Image (cartoon, grey):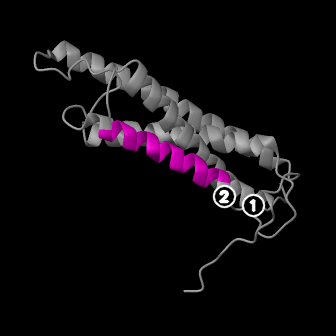
């Protein structure tokens, strides 16, 4: 049984690169899952590859969309599991301390990296889909990139504050 206290606050920082890597992997996977669930399934704004995003789409086009979205979800889920597995491995020895802001910060960075990479490649370079096709699609695509940049910057700030030993801020309300 490990004696690790994984989310200690106000402790000397002995975080490992493995914890940060775990957070980034987890964030990339979770970001992909959220994208797939929200934009592909619930809002149905687009699919990974928009075979049916045109007026003449057939049922076979819809099936190909669903299959491509399924592959996308498998990759996103695999990244999430890899992140959790890496975090578990890093913490189970009890030698790594994890201040409360390191993992969430790294996860935000991972989610932001997902948005930036997916947005640049799929929306702009390959143009296999857009966040919301049709009028104003460039605005939606740019907002998606901006959300990725904000997630990366916010996550880096959280990790930097933790690395500087900044005490966790708890609301007194």
Of 144 and 60, nearer the camera is 144
Residue at 64 percent across and 41 percent down: it is 24
Q: Which residue is mark 1?
A: 162
Label 1 with label 2: CB-CB less than 8 Å: yes
Give neighbour class at mark 1: few <14, some 14-19, many 20+ (Cα, 10 Å): many
Task: Measure the C-alpha gap from mark 1 to mark 2.
Answer: 6 Å
Regarding residue 47, the answer to whether it shows in the image is yes
Give neighbour class at mark 2: few <14, some 14-19, many 20+ (Cα, 10 Å): many
Q: In the image, is residue 43 above or below residue 77?
A: below
Q: Position of residue 168 (x, y in %)?
A: 70, 71
**How many numbered dots are placed on residues in this image?**
2
The tag on residue 158 is: 2
Q: Main secondary structure of the magenta part?
A: helix
Residue 122 inside the magenta-drawn segment = no
Q: Read off the magenta span.
A: 139-156
Quadrant in the picture for residue 55: top left
Q: Position of residue 108 (x, y in %)?
A: 58, 49
Q: Position of residue 37 (x, y in %)?
A: 36, 40
Residue at 50 percent across and 43 percent down: it is 148
Locate the C terminus by quadrant.
bottom right
Regarding residue 6, the answer to whether it shows in the image is no
Residue at 82 percent across and 58 percent down: it is 4
Q: In the image, is residue 55 above or below residue 9?
A: above
Q: In the image, is residue 152 above or below residue 114?
A: below
């Amino acid at each position: 049984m490990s004696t690790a206290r994984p989310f200690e606050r106000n402790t000397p920082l002995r975080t490992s690169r493995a914890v940060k890597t775990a957070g980034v992997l987890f964030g990339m996977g979770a970001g992909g899952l959220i994208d797939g669930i929200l934009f592909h399934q619930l809002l149905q704004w687009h699919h990974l590859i928009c075979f049916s995003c045109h007026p003449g789409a057939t049922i076979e086009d819809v099936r190909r969309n669903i299959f491509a979205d399924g592959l996308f979800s498998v990759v996103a889920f695999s990244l999430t599991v890899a992140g959790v597995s890496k975090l578990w491995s890093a913490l189970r020895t009890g030698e790594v301390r994890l201040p409360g802001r390191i993992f969430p910060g790294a996860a935000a960075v991972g989610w932001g990296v997902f948005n930036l990479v997916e947005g640049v490649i799929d929306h702009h370079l390959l143009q296999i889909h857009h966040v919301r096709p049709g009028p104003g699609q460039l605005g939606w695509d740019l907002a998606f990139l901006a959300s990725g940049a904000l997630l990366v910057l916010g996550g880096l700030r959280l990790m930097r504050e933790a690395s500087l030993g900044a005490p966790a801020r708890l609301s007194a309300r």
